[in-house]
Image: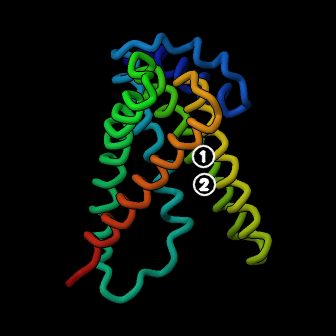
């Protein structure tokens, strides 16, 4: 992976985050580009860790901290690859399989921006009254959902309602993996 590939992926993500679909032109849509985009897992990892440190409430009884951290780390990595795999099935259903590598690359790089947005919101929320903190968190979630929708719509070249389906599938998968991660951190 070259610095040029990383710069192209991050620039694509920033442009997409600004509603500029031309960011996709920075990615060639090849399988190699999709594979290289998994470097975003490593780039985003410090953001994910910081987000967890800022936003995790005190752990309830029965949660082993070491097991939970281990499960979170494994879940973090698995979620990136599981999303790509599940989205291959979605791409086939949408008759967009040839665009799947472009989608994977754009989706992976946009995850760096999404985590940065969530982290910024979580940090700001720590200094605000509860009602305002909830508003900031809700606004960040809304923006991230919009970004996911925009990436899905543009990378798959599908109408908006179909892009909503892609985001919905990702949400369901994310909730499932989060629940699984939490259950693995629970001492029985």
Residue found at x 31% / y 65%: 180
* Residue 162 % position (x, y): 56, 36
Q: Is residue 60 above or below residue 109?
A: below
Q: Quadrant of residue 16?
A: top right
Q: Is residue 39 visible?
A: no
Whole-Å distance between the Cαs marked 1 and 2? 5 Å
Residue 119 is tagged as 2
SS state under label 1: helix
> Who is closer to the viewer here, 167 or 92?
92
* Residue 177 % position (x, y): 35, 58
Seen as rendered, the residue at the extreme left is 188
> Who is closer to the viewer here, 87 or 78?
87
The residue labelled by disc 1 is: 116
Residue found at x 67% / y 21%: 21
Quadrant of the rendering where the C terminus is positioned:
bottom left
* Residue 125 % position (x, y): 70, 66
Residue found at x 51% / y 27%: 106
Q: Is 123 left, or right, of 27 in this rendering?
A: right
Q: Is residue 81 above or below residue 153?
A: below
């Amino acid at each position: 992976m070259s610095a040029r590939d990383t710069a192209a992926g991050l620039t694509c993500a920033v442009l997409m985050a600004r509603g500029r679909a031309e960011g996709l032109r920075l990615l060639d849509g090849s399988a190699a580009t999709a594979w290289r985009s998994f470097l975003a897992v490593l780039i985003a990892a410090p953001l994910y860790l910081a987000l967890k440190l800022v936003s995790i409430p005190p752990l309830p009884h029965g949660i082993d901290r070491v097991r939970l951290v281990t499960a979170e780390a494994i879940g973090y990595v698995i979620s990136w690859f599981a999303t790509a795999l599940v989205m291959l099935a979605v791409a086939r259903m949408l008759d967009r399989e040839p665009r799947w590598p472009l989608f994977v690359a754009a989706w992976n790089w946009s995850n760096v921006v999404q985590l940065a947005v969530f982290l910024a919101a979580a940090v700001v929320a720590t200094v605000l009254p509860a009602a305002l903190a909830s508003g900031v968190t809700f606004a960040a979630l809304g923006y991230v959902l919009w970004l996911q929708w925009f990436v899905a719509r543009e990378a798959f070249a599908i109408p908006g309602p179909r892009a909503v389906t892609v985001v919905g599938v990702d949400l369901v998968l994310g909730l499932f993996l989060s629940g699984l991660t939490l259950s693995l951190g629970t001492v029985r």
